[in-house]
Image (cartoon, helix red, strand yellow):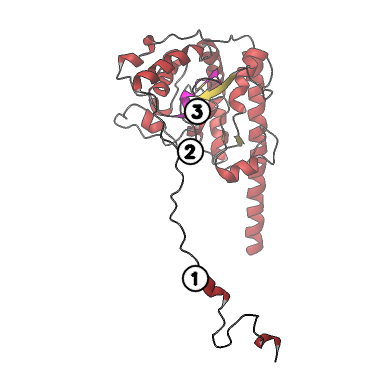
Amino acid sequence: MSSMNQLNAGEDPGQPRQRAGNLKQNSPPALNRTRPQWPQWEPPTAAQFLELAHLTVPFIRFLAPEVVRVMVEDTEKHRKEWTERLGKLEIGASQYLWERSPTLFPGVRRKTGNKETKAAKSVPVGSALPSKDAIALDDNHYPKEAWAYVFLGTKFRNRGPAGYAQAHIFDHKVYGNRLEAELAPRSEGQAPIRSCHGLFTSIANTVFMPNGLMRPTDFPGPLRNLLQRKAETLYGQCCVLLPGGRRARPSIDDQWSIDAFQWSESVGTIENVPIFLEFRRQTIEDLLAKREALHRAAEQAEVRNLATVG
């Protein structure tokens, strides 16, 4: 008798052998288990949130309007040239440059999504990473350059003021953008703003605030709106914060009026601004030149391909 037909010890030769797959049918039924849930914690009430805002606001640092004014005036001198060069690269300049725009590095935007994040890791910080709507992708490096020059007279070295972090006031990213929802209703003829890449490096769109306090820029609400209205008050005479003349929603509660809060004095002087402006000019020139070279190479390759096909 072959080994395949041999019976295991204790088996009844009169009964068919049980297949391994049938063992599950005789297993005890699985217990019904509910998935563990996080506990439900009470969020702050509106009154408590207001108290937290009063604790936070005095520590938020805005740049001095005079600093913003000088930088915007320099941008105006280059706006026509930069707009034309971005246009030739088929990059929408209106996302970055409008009249009296506070954008410092037109053509530079925040990287988004896993694909761009992985690609950005393969190049040095601040390097040109081609994109269909940008000359460089960045991870919160370029927005800090102006602040570093104002206070240190040099490039940003990956470390800001101790205990403080930079935060954006108006949304600049494409994914989950809240910008249109946070603006005042459009008047006739005004287009909706789905996103605005120029707000990423806008000198009027960043503040520094303590790491240990709540981050008002991380969620919607009255504190975000308060900072947006404060920026408009500080810089409204220096620049146009948003394209198309759009503005933040007006306050509907006197408890959240700008005057109801204690604000720190704006910070910084124009002493080191000329050094920054030269650095900014050279940086944009380098980024544009690299992208223009890639654009020419792509055009030449297309011509060769057409000639080959013909």
Q: Position of residue 165 (x, y in %)?
A: 57, 22
Give the Cα distance between marks 1 and 3: 65 Å
Residue at the disc numbered 3:
199
- In this view, 214 is above or below 293: above
Q: Are marks 2 and 1 in contact (CB under 8 Å)?
A: no
**Which span of residues is magenta-colored?**
207-219
Q: Quadrant of residue 186?
A: top left
Q: Is residue 194 above or below residue 187?
A: below
**Does 89 appear above or below 104?**
below
As drawn, the residue found furthest toward the front would be: 10
Q: Is residue 6 above or below residue 94?
A: below
Which element carries disc 1, helix, strand or loop?
helix
- Label whose residue precedes the other's in the sequence (3 or 2): 2
Residue 94 position within the rendered picture, expressed as x and y whole percent measured from the top left: 48, 33
Label 3 or label 2, whichever lies nearer to me, is: 2
Q: Are marks 1 and 3 in contact (CB under 8 Å)?
A: no
Mark whose residue sits in front, 1 or 3 = 1
Tag 1: residue type?
Asn
**Residue 253 horizontal side relative to residue 11, left or right:** left
The location of residue 57, given as percent across then percent down, is 46, 14
Q: Amino acid at mark 3?
A: Leu
In terms of image quadrants, where is residue 1? bottom right
The location of residue 81, given as percent across then percent down, is 57, 29
Q: Residues within 10 Å of mark 2 (few under 14, many from 20)?
A: some
Residue drawn at (58%, 84%), measured in percent from left and top? 12
Q: Residue at x 39, y 22 (%)?
A: 225
Mark number for residue 174? 2
Q: Earlier in the sequence, mark 1 or mark 3?
A: 1
| Left-right relation of 191 to 103 | left
Name the residue beneath numbered marker 1. 26
Magenta segment: does it hold 217?
yes
For badge 2, the amino acid type reads Val
